[in-house]
Image (cartoon, rainbow, N blue to C red):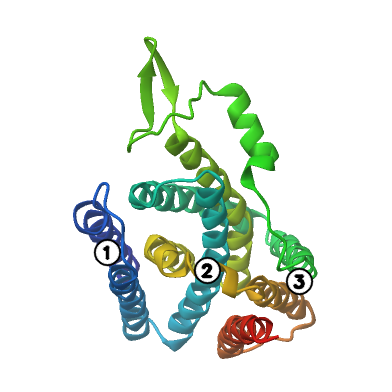
Amino acid sequence: MSTDLLSYLIFILALAISFLLDLLVFSKKNKEVSIRSASFQYLFWVAMALSYCVYLWYTYDAHTSLNYLSAYFMEMSLSIDNIFVFVLIFTSLQISSKNIGRVLMVGVILAIIFRIIFIAVGIVLVQKFSWILYIFGGFLIFTGVKMLFSNPEEETDIRDGKIYKLIRRYLRYTDIEPEGKYIITKNEKAYFTKLSLVIIMIGVTDIIFALDSIPAVFAITTDNLVVYSSNIFAVLGLRALFFILQKAASKFDFLQQGIAIVLIFIGAKMFLELIHLHLPVWVSLVVILLSIGGSIVYSIYHTRKKLHA
């Protein structure tokens, strides 16, 4: 058995175990997840991701391991931004806390499926048209600049969006309390509930965020194993991280600016390679950690300053 095949098998096994744990242990129907429980779950996912990093270091080399770690932390930071959109969806549609766990589990599965599809397409494109990496880089810079100058305190009701209105227009929908059901029967007709609406909106959100995250990871490495594993390990902790951050979402006003700096840096890094200026892998890792960590610290400082003003 080749080393690459063994690495993929270990990764797939870890993924299968994760799904079983989520279905049978972590995701209990009609039960609200406490912050304490979510914290233990998230530490478990992080431990799995870091263990795979150690495996890559031992099996391959430090370069592969650091590429994986950089991609993982970058995808994790993009996942945090994803979570805040989820918070907005659940809040706007007034979803009961006891139903959020199951809905998020479906959201994570959709995120993994979409990433597998997008990564597969990306790999084919990069192999046939290597210059497409610079298009990815330009896209990341454009997205980063747009995020950097957006208003961090702007609040939106998801029901005012085009996606919500489009779904409501074409689905047979009811506002009746779903009681954990995605479809209910009324007057001998099947109606989609709020939970179905949330699943669709989360799926659309997953696609939108995949359009950012996939070019970003290719900007760090084109190693197929690293691209797949870093992306999916980051997504696995999404559900647990939601329950940790949902009450603190308003305290991270400047997190998207930190993410924007990361996207701009990663995009610019690709263009630097055109002039044969190759930055070491650890530089990317340090920039990602400092940008995200710094934006979180500044957000907390800014929030406390407003409270004491």
Whether 86 is drawn above or below 287: the answer is above
- Location of residue 230 in the rendering, given as x and y in whole percent from the top left corner: 45, 69
For the residue marked with disc 3, what is the amino acid? Leu
Whether 244 is drawn above or below 155: the answer is below
- Location of residue 167 in the rendering, given as x and y in whole percent from the top left corner: 59, 31
Q: Which of the pair 208/266 is nearer the observer?
A: 208
Q: Mark 1 points at which residue?
A: 14
Instruction: Estimate how packed mark 2 is, as few (under 14), some (14 to 19) or many (20 or more) residues with alpha carbons within 10 Å.
Output: many
Instruction: Estimate how packed mark 1 is, as few (under 14), some (14 to 19) or many (20 or more) residues with alpha carbons within 10 Å.
Output: some
Q: Residue 148 carries which label?
A: 3
Asked which quadrant contains residue 25, the reply is: bottom left
For image coordinates 50% across by 50% down, the residue present is 90
For the residue marked with disc 2, what is the amino acid? Glu
Whether 183 is drawn above or below 1: the answer is above
Q: What element carries label 2?
A: helix
- Nearer the observer: mark 2 or 1; the answer is 2
Whether 119 is drawn above or below 166: the answer is below
Q: Which of the pair 213/205 is nearer the observer?
A: 205
- Location of residue 47 in the rendering, given as x and y in whole percent from the top left corner: 31, 78
- Location of residue 288 in the rendering, given as x and y in whole percent from the top left corner: 59, 82
Q: Name the residue under label 2.
A: 75
Q: Quadrant of the N terminus?
A: bottom left
For image coordinates 63% across by 70% down, the residue present is 219
- Nearer the observer: mark 3 or 2; the answer is 3
